[in-house]
Image (cartoon, grey):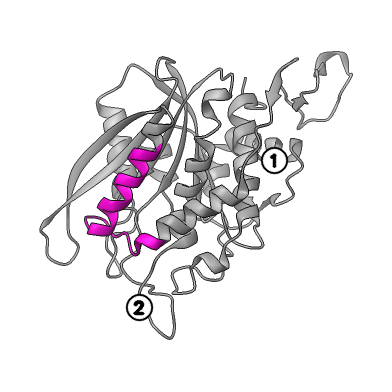
């Protein structure tokens, strides 16, 4: 099935709606996203257990991700660096994973998530030092990209696409500990050691598997990347996804901040910050939805092909 994009002729007044900015005569493929398979990936990641930066669980997850995308034909780059442990000060080896599709293309889209888990469920009133597996806050972005990977080689893309998995987003034990270690390192390297490609647009995903899923405009995304933000929500509208709500709600500090401020990559944040199990032991697969994963995958697969309003 093909979604046929509207032939917009604003100057002639054929369509006068201000928020319709679609590339002319472009056909966009609609891949058959497998919700069951996507949720299976989420379960598999959670079965590893906690995936704290530098831990055995994180190393096992890294092996799973690398093997998965190698089998799908992607190019994988490992970006390693050290950061001091918040408690001991000893170096912790961190690793961002960069999964590239069409690496020959010099203009690229950045899709990203964090893949580490917080050491403890600090927002859990009953058990703030319990076992935290981060089904939505950690595994959902990984599962989303693992499912999207099955479809990437079938798409006719104008841009190359990099899926980046940030380490060290939540190596946080106490109030005041530093967040966003992986995204800050990635952004700094991109700024200071300019590669031979350019990231035109970015999308960060975080907590996108909750039920029911509600994705509002995030306020910092509107501040730093308004056109990208509106473009993604336009794509959601085109595929009939009602979980994307065109209304600003939360202001979130997340991995998109270093990407915007340091790397100057206009990046929006897809985050359901109303997820009631945030940083609790309840952030488990039973409180996530395969349909949520499927719906976000459908929107992003459409968006990376059409990038409405950005051409």
The image shows residue 107 at horizontal and vertical percentages of: 46, 18
Give the residue at mark 1.
Answer: 236
Give the residue at mark 2.
Answer: 130
Residue 186 position (above or below residue 191): below
Q: Is residue 112 magenta?
A: no
Label 2: which secondary element: loop
Q: How many marks?
A: 2
Q: Alpha-carbon neighbours of circle 1 within 10 Å: few (<14), some, or many (≥20)?
A: many
Is 59 left or right of 228, judged from the image as shown? left
Magenta stretch, overall SS: helix
Residue found 77% across the figure and 42% down from its top: 240
Is 73 left or right of 88, judged from the image as shown? right
In this picture, which residue range is highlighted in magenta? Answer: 47-68
- Quadrant for the C terminus, please: top right
Q: Residue furthest bottom?
A: 126
Q: Is residue 61 magenta?
A: yes
């Amino acid at each position: 099935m093909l979604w046929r994009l509207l032939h917009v002729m604003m100057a002639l007044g054929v369509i006068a709606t201000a928020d319709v900015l679609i590339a002319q005569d472009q056909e966009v493929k609609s891949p058959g996203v497998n919700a069951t398979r996507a949720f299976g990936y989420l379960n598999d990641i959670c079965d590893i257990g906690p995936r704290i930066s530098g831990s055995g669980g994180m190393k096992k997850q890294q092996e799973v991700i690398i093997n998965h995308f190698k089998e799908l034909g992607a190019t994988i780059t490992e970006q390693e660096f050290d950061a001091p442990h918040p408690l001991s000060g000893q170096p912790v080896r961190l690793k961002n994973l960069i999964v590239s599709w069409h690496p020959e293309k010099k203009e690229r889209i950045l899709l990203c998530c964090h893949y580490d888990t917080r050491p403890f469920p600090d927002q859990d009133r009953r058990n703030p030092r319990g076992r935290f597996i981060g089904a939505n806050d950690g595994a959902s972005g990984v599962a989303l990209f693992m499912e999207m990977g099955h479809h990437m080689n079938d798409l006719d893309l104008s841009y190359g696409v990099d899926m980046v998995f940030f380490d060290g987003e939540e190596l946080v034990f106490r109030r005041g500990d530093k967040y966003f270690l992986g995204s800050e390192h990635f952004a700094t390297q991109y700024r200071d050691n300019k590669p031979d490609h350019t990231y035109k647009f970015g999308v960060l995903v975080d907590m996108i598997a909750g039920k029911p899923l509600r994705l509002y405009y995030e306020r910092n995304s509107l501040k730093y990347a308004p056109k990208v933000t509106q473009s993604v929500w336009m794509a959601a509208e085109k595929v009939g996804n009602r979980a994307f709500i065109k209304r600003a709600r939360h202001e979130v500090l997340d991995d998109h901040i270093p990407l915007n401020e340091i790397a100057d990559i206009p990046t929006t944040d897809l985050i359901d910050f109303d997820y009631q199990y945030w940083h609790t032991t309840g952030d488990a697969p039973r409180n996530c939805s395969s349909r949520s994963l499927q719906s976000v995958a459908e929107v992003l697969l459409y968006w990376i092909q059409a990038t409405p309003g950005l051409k």
